[in-house]
């Protein structure tokens, strides 16, 4: 076939897969949720990262390390809202559905995070923001790697 190496072929396939093809359902809590309830959600939903919203728009991300930090730092987890301990916008690394999974993987590596919220830009009363429509994690990317290897 057209003189292409197996690696060229692999790379072409990766670039043609969009975030929308492999994204999973996001786990989302409101900024007012207590740290305690967010930790319970983390266990019940079996994820490492939770996306935080206010008025339906993305305001932050909270992950295992943030919870551990707040616990060893003596935060009153039954009283303090998750908004206090999360990583906050505009420091959130996001991806959009139409982007390639290569771009998503590059963002995960460059910013040393486990997952990215998949977002849609939206405007609410003249205020720009992001609606969270999905999640891309290292697991999603690894699954593609395995699927491509088996599809020979
Ligand atoms: P873990 O805490 O399970 O190791 P991460 O390595 O993803 O998970 O998180 C490390 C830090 O980066 C945490 O403070 C978390 O809030 C933050 N973080 C996680 N995902 C993102 C993201 N997409 N954009 C910005 N910061 C993030």
Image (tube, rainbow, N blue to C red):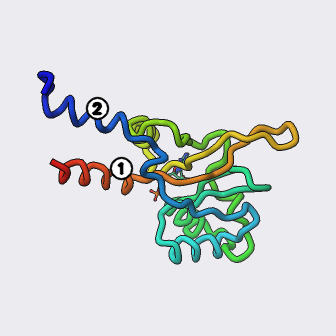
User: Against 31, is 87 above or below?
Assistant: above
Q: Position of residue 143 (x, y in %)?
A: 31, 55
Give the quarter of the image for residue 112: top left
Choose the circle earlier in sequence order: 1 or 2: 2
Residue found at x 67% / y 43%: 89
The yes-or-no answer for disc 1 within 8 Å of ligand 1 is no
Please state which of the two labelled residues, at mark 1 or mark 2, is closer to the viewer.
2
User: Against 44, is 137 above or below?
Assistant: above
Q: Residue furthest top?
A: 3
- Residue holding disc 2: 12
Residue found at x 48% / y 36%: 99
Residue in front for this viewpoint, 101 or 20: 20
Residue in front for this viewpoint, 91 or 132: 132
The yes-or-no answer for disc 2 within 8 Å of ligand 1 is no
Residue found at x 28% / y 32%: 12
Alpha carbon distance from label 1 to label 2: 15 Å
Q: Residues within 10 Å of mark 2 (few under 14, many from 20)?
A: few
Q: Residues within 10 Å of mark 1 (few under 14, many from 20)?
A: some
User: Against 30, is 122 above or below?
Assistant: above
Residue in front for this viewpoint, 140 or 10: 10
| Residue 86, numbered circle | none
- Residue holding disc 1: 141
Q: Position of residue 13 (x, y in %)?
A: 29, 37
Q: Is residue 95 left or right of residue 146?
A: right
Q: Is residue 106 left or right of residue 86?
A: left
Q: Position of residue 109 (x, y in %)?
A: 39, 40
Give the quarter of the image for residue 50: bottom right
Q: Is residue 19 left or right of residue 86?
A: left
């Amino acid at each position: 076939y057209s003189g292409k190496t197996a690696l060229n072929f692999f790379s072409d396939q990766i670039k043609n897969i969009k975030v929308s093809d492999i994204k999973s359902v996001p786990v989302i809590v409101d900024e007012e949720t207590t740290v305690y309830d967010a930790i319970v959600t983390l266990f019940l939903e079996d994820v490492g990262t939770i996306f935080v919203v206010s008025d339906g728009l993305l305001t932050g991300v909270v992950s295992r390390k943030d919870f551990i930090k707040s616990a060893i730092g003596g935060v009153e987890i039954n009283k303090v809202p998750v908004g206090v301990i999360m990583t906050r916008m505009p420091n959130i690394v996001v991806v959009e559905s139409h982007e390639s999974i290569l771009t998503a993987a590059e963002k995960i590596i460059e910013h040393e995070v486990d997952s990215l919220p998949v977002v849609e830009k939206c405007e609410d009363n003249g205020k720009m923001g992001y609606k969270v429509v999905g999640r891309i994690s290292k697991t999603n990317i690894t699954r593609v790697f395995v699927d491509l290897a088996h599809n020979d």
